[in-house]
Amino acid sequence: MTTTGAERDADRVGNWWWWGRRRGAVLDGGLALVSAVECALEGVGSAEQASLPVPLGVLFGLAVGSVLLVRRRWPIVVVLVSIAVTPAEMGFLMGIVGLYSLAASEVPRRITALLAGMSTLAVFVVTVVRMRQDIAHADVGEPDIDPSGWYVPVVAVFMTLGLNAPPLLFGLYIGARRRLMESLRERADSLEQELSLLADRAEQRAQWARQEERTRIAREMHDVVAHRVSLMVVHAAALQAVALKDPQKAVKNAALVGDMGRQALTELREMLGVLREDAVPAAPAPVPLAAVGRAAAAAAEAAADDGPCLDALEDLCEQSRLAGAVVELVVLGDARAHPPEVERTAYRVVQEALTNVHKHAAGAEVVVRLAHRDGEVAMQVENGPCPSDAGAADVRLPSGGNGLVGMRERVLRLGGVFVAGATDAGGFRVSAVLPTVTPLSGGVAALR
């Protein structure tokens, strides 16, 4: 795992004041020691020329050379001190290192240019004066070159540029390279953080997709099993009641129970088969979570394509009639084809409502209304009061309490309206309105 810039800075910073690294402190300490020795030796000659005590010149040189120790923290101070001691002909190493440190630092470029110009001018003037003094005190006889003309300035310019230009240019290069590396490091850290966030979001989306598909599959399983099994239980209760009185009707009810059981098993086998076919195959390498979510979504979509439609409502009502319920189907408007998701949801709402009637109001009269409108389809399942509490008690169908919740989720997912509640006559009504052009279909497709 890579470390970020903040972690690297935290690792570097210790008890080394402004250096941050031990090798930086050692390097600056060594340069300051060499510069102090150089300035101390040069201070001897400067003290003799100024008729000052030699120890005073040595102490002054040591103090001046030691300024190089703060070149990283205060490079301007180092350059100013080197300019100040240029007339004393000392601190050449300090001047070179100071210019490099100034150019490589974060000091504004206008200040760097000003100090570099001052240092260059100081070195040029001192060099010209020193060369003229040496020529004046030397016994040159009859020289071939007139030292009072262009020779001294030209040589002084070359010497000045040779001393100041290399450290200044090298410092500018190092500073630009350092800033570039820092920018690249910050960009890499930013990209690493973004990748980490993207990975977390992908993990969350995969988890959400798994949960969503798990809920959807559970809803489909509930719709398939609850209705078929509820009818089977109702028919089994009727079979038990008429087994001795009417053997022919008992045989007919037994055949119905068998047919419904086979239908339930067929639907379950088809759904589980689709999931098994579209599941991600096992492999030695770990499977990405997003692939699992996509596989689950594909499985649910494939299972949904083979789902029921509104044309099967008459058969659905007929199954309830065979179970002894009085069910009336009323279709309003011109029948037309709707999107598969809409028809499947409408079918499931009616199916779950009829299942609830068998569970909680056995024997009650039921009216199923289906209305085809412009841009929407509406359905309503209303049952009257239960004629006999004993009839409902004999069936003893368990209730998980998820039927109405599942219907509401299905309808709201398509942008529809769902209402369920007791009627004034003592019955129960389930109503739903679904738009035939679902606004969420594009978003759902995009998520998949």
Image (cartoon, helix red, strand yellow):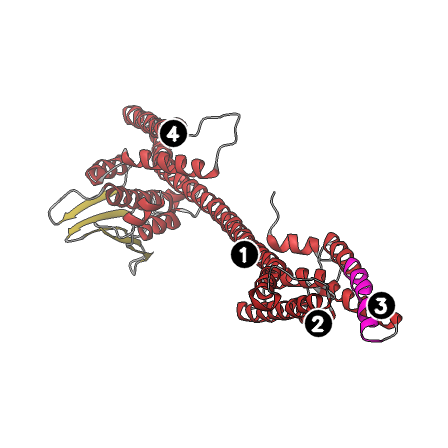
The image shows residue 308 at horizontal and vertical percentages of 26, 36
Magenta highlight on residue 44: yes
Quick one: label 2 or label 4, which is nearer the N terminus? 2
Against 82, is 349 above or below? Answer: above
Q: How far apart, in angstroms, are the residues tagged by discs 4 and 3?
A: 88 Å
Element type where label 4 sits in the image: helix
Q: Is residue 111 left or right of residue 252?
A: right
Q: Which mark is residue 278?
A: 4
- Work out whether residue 200 or residue 343 is closer to the camera in this orientation and state it: 200
Instruction: Please give the residue where the numbered disc 2 appears in the rendered image.
Output: 87
Q: Secondary structure at mark 2?
A: helix
- Going from N to C along the chain, the mark reached first, 4 or 1, is 1
Q: Is residue 105 above or below residue 280?
A: below
Quadrant into which the C terminus falls: top left
The residue singled out by tag 3 in the image is 58
Residue 65 falls within the magenta-colored stretch:
no
Neighbor class of circle 2 (other Cα within 10 Å; few <14, some 14-19, many 20+) is some
Taking the image as shown, residue 134 lies to the left or right of residue 219, namely right
